[in-house]
Image: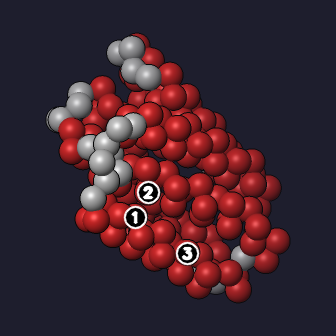
């Protein structure tokens, strides 16, 4: 279900004439979802690679949308808080990452860069910014479930629902916001 939802968003973005970086990011995310639908121990790294690419597309797109915007101290403060908080969270996860340490560090860097680029967007893109922050929150919860939850612990349904809700509706907000500025 998660794969088809984001794949449909990619098709909607394409059919609506959305920026190619948007539908490419959504398509890369759908590929990442497909990998993560399998066994996480086998498909986590390729899934992260697909999502890494999606975030690269988003970073480029958000930078293009924000070109020429003047970022005042509230924007810079928001970016600082996001990056500092994200780096602290990743550092907190580090002892549990094992072989995934460097891939998680790289992924964390690109998703925080995507969030910082979204925070810098002008006001008419506020829904895009909200969606990007929802995506980051989803990944933070997922990282906690993947790396901190004991292997023998029962699945945390509330966390699983939160991951899906924040991820899908974050992607939907980015899509809607880009197709309908100032929505």
Q: Residue at image x 39%, y 73%?
A: 81
Is residue 33 depicted above or below 71 in this figure? above
Q: Residue at image x 51%, y 60%?
A: 112
Q: Of the residues under marks 1 and 2, which one precedes in the sequence?
A: 1
Dot 3, how many residues are within 10 Å of its Cα: few (below 14), some (14-19), or many (20+)?
some
Q: Residue at image x 68%, y 65%?
A: 104
Q: Which residue is mark 3?
A: 87
Q: Is residue 106 left or right of residue 88?
A: right
| Residue 55 in view in this figure | yes
Q: Of the residues under marks 2 and 3, which one precedes in the sequence?
A: 3
Q: Is residue 116 left or right of residue 183?
A: right
Q: Is residue 146 left or right of residue 3?
A: right
Mark 1 and mark 3: span between their CA atoms? 12 Å
Q: Which residue is mark 1?
A: 79
Mark 2 and mark 3: span between their CA atoms? 13 Å
Q: Residue 111: x percent and y percent?
A: 54, 56
Callout 1–callout 2 Cβ contact below 8 Å: yes
Q: In which quadrant of the rendered view does residue 149 lie?
A: bottom right
Location of the C terminus by quadrant is top left
Dot 1, how many residues are within 10 Å of its Cα: few (below 14), some (14-19), or many (20+)?
many
Q: Residue at image x 59%, y 85%?
A: 92
The residue nearer to you, when weighing 167 against 67, is: 67
Provide the secondary structure element on which disc 1 rests: helix
Is residue 9 depicted above or below 102 in this figure? above
Q: Which residue is mark 2?
A: 116
Q: Residue 38: x percent and y percent?
A: 69, 49
Q: Residue 173: x percent and y percent?
A: 31, 42
């Amino acid at each position: 279900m998660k794969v088809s939802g984001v794949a449909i968003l990619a098709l909607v973005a394409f059919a609506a004439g959305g920026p190619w970086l948007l539908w490419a990011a959504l398509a890369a995310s759908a590929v990442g979802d497909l990998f993560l639908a399998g066994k996480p121990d086998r498909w986590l790294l390729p899934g992260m690679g697909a999502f890494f690419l999606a975030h690269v597309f988003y970073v480029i797109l958000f930078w293009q949308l924000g070109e020429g915007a003047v970022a005042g101290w509230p924007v810079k403060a928001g970016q600082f808080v996001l990056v500092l908080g994200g780096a602290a969270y990743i550092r907190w996860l580090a002892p549990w990452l094992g072989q995934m340490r460097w891939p998680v560090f790289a992924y964390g860097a690109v998703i925080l860069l995507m969030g910082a680029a979204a925070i810098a967007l002008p006001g008419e893109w506020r829904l895009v910014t909200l969606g990007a922050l929802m995506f980051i929150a989803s990944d933070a919860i997922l990282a906690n479930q993947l790396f901190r939850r004991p292997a023998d612990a029962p699945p945390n349904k509330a966390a699983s629902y939160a991951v899906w809700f924040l991820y899908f509706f974050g992607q939907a907000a980015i899509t809607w916001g880009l197709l309908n500025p100032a929505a």
